[in-house]
């Protein structure tokens, strides 16, 4: 029951964050007639750098934002790949607490590898798909897209502050749902339960409280109150504040914008799919990992461990990868293994992508795993 409740909470959290970000992007893009993201569309390299920056944000929120931008055709596939390589999911918080110096070096390496991989991916991807828009112009591009770069452009803004506004049941349902979600975020009701996923390299249990509150107390001193930047709590509160923007859009937006763009396009089309896939994947992984002891898979063979770390990175979940963090912190595995694990895995960030585009998910994971193997073996040779 505890596992089921934790999976349900995480599914609601992930789905809510993605849907809110999709609503924000839709609102900004349409209200500004595409000008908000116009600069981002002009340069693929800029998109890749921006994707890598979002991926470098500890936790999964930067990843969710990138997936939302990608599904809205506002970021390139290379930028998506860069985000997935730069992101280390929830492990980022644990690494910053347990191995801060090594973590900063690792994050810098991931950022560089992400940009290089993203730029190369875009060059190859664009070359392969260069003629797609011309061949399928009438079928895929449509009146609201621009074939030259593949990104959606709306021909005119929805000036919803000038149009009619009525508080029908659809608007009220979204208002209530978003208000509850904001309250749950602000009060920490939807925080990740890291202790349900992590394991110690030797005993089979990791006391994550010690990791997350590592800097709260000094030995022999009384506890003092201050903000812990190694926790996701402050990010949840920040995101709750940003969600107030969407709440204002729901209050002030026109009937057409709220019902057609937010309700029909996002809530009806995307929300059920994202939640179903998120809950299903987390449930399967949560139950399956109860019967799989990853500790027993670990070997002293560095080559085998790099291959294993890369393979486990395919799993869109934070728990299985924590073993490599704890083993590295304990000095049981070399840095190349942790590097390969960090490149191939991206926490929960790719689950919404799996719901939206399975082809993009598989292709991005193949590229990530290839980059992980290349970087891991290169680091092993050089070290």
Image (cartoon, grey):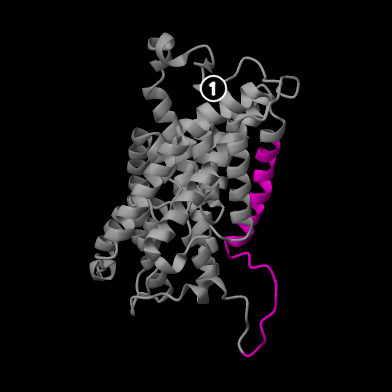
Percent across and percent down for residue 7 are 41, 56
Nearer to the camera, 199 or 87:
199
The quadrant of the rendering that contains the C terminus is bottom left
Is 177 contained in the magenta span?
Answer: no
In the rendered image, the vertical position of residue 228 relative to residue 52, given as above or below: below
Is 231 contained in the magenta span?
Answer: yes
The stretch of residues the image draws in magenta is 220-248
In the rendered image, the vertical position of residue 365 relative to residue 31, given as above or below: below
Residue at label 1?
152
- Of all residues shown, which one is farthest toward the front? 169
Residue at image coords 58%, 38%: 173
Nearer to the camera, 215 or 381:
215
Q: Quadrant of residue 197?
A: bottom left
Percent across and percent down for residue 69 are 54, 35
Q: Quadrant of residue 224?
A: bottom right
Q: Secondary structure at mark 1?
A: strand
Residue at image coords 24%, 70%: 296
The answer to whether residue 377 is seen in the rendering is no
Percent across and percent down for residue 176 are 61, 43
Percent across and percent down for residue 221 are 66, 88
The answer to whether residue 244 is seen in the rendering is yes
Relative to 322, is 161 on the left or the right? right
Query: Mark 1 packing: few (<14 Cα in 10 Å), some, or many (20+)?
Result: many
- Of all residues shown, which one is farthest toward the right? 162
């Amino acid at each position: 029951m505890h596992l089921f409740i934790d999976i349900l909470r995480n599914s609601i959290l992930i789905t809510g964050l993605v849907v809110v970000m999709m609503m924000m992007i839709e609102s900004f893009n349409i209200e500004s007639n595409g000008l908000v993201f116009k600069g981002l569309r002009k340069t693929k390299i800029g998109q890749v750098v921006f994707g890598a920056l979002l991926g470098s944000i500890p936790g999964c929120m930067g990843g969710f934002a990138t997936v939302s931008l990608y599904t809205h055709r506002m970021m390139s596939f290379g930028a998506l790949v860069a985000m997935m390589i730069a992101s280390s999911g929830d492990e980022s918080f644990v690494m910053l607490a347990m191995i801060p110096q090594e973590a900063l070096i690792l994050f810098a390496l991931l950022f560089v590898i992400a940009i290089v991989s993203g730029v190369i991916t875009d060059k190859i991807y664009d070359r392969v798909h260069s003629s797609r828009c011309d061949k399928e112009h009438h079928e895929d591009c449509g009146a609201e897209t621009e074939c030259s770069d593949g990104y959606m452009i709306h021909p005119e803004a929805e000036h919803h502050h000038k149009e009619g506004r009525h508080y029908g049941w659809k608007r009220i349902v979204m208002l209530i749902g978003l208000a509850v979600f904001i309250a749950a975020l602000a009060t920490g009701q939807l925080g990740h339960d890291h202790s349900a996923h992590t394991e110690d390299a030797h005993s089979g249990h990791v006391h994550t409280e010690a990791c997350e509150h590592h800097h709260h107390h000094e030995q022999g001193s009384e506890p003092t109150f201050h903000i812990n930047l190694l926790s996701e709590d402050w990010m949840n509160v920040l995101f709750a504040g940003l969600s107030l923007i969407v709440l204002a859009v729901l209050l002030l937006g026109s009937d057409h914008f709220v019902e057609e763009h937010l309700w029909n396009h996002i809530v009806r089309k995307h929300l059920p799919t994202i939640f179903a896939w998120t809950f299903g994947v987390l449930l399967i992984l949560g139950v399956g990992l109860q019967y799989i002891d990853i500790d027993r898979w670990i070997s002293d063979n560095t080559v085998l461990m790099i291959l294993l770390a890369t393979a486990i990175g395919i799993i869109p979940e934070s728990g299985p990868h924590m073993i490599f963090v704890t083993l590295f912190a304990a000095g049981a595995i070399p840095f190349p293994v942790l590097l390969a694990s960090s490149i191939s895995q991206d926490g929960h960030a790719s689950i919404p992508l799996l719901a939206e585009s399975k082809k993009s998910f598989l292709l991005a994971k193949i590229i990530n795993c290839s980059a992980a193997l290349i970087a891991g073996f290169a680091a092993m040779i050089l070290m």
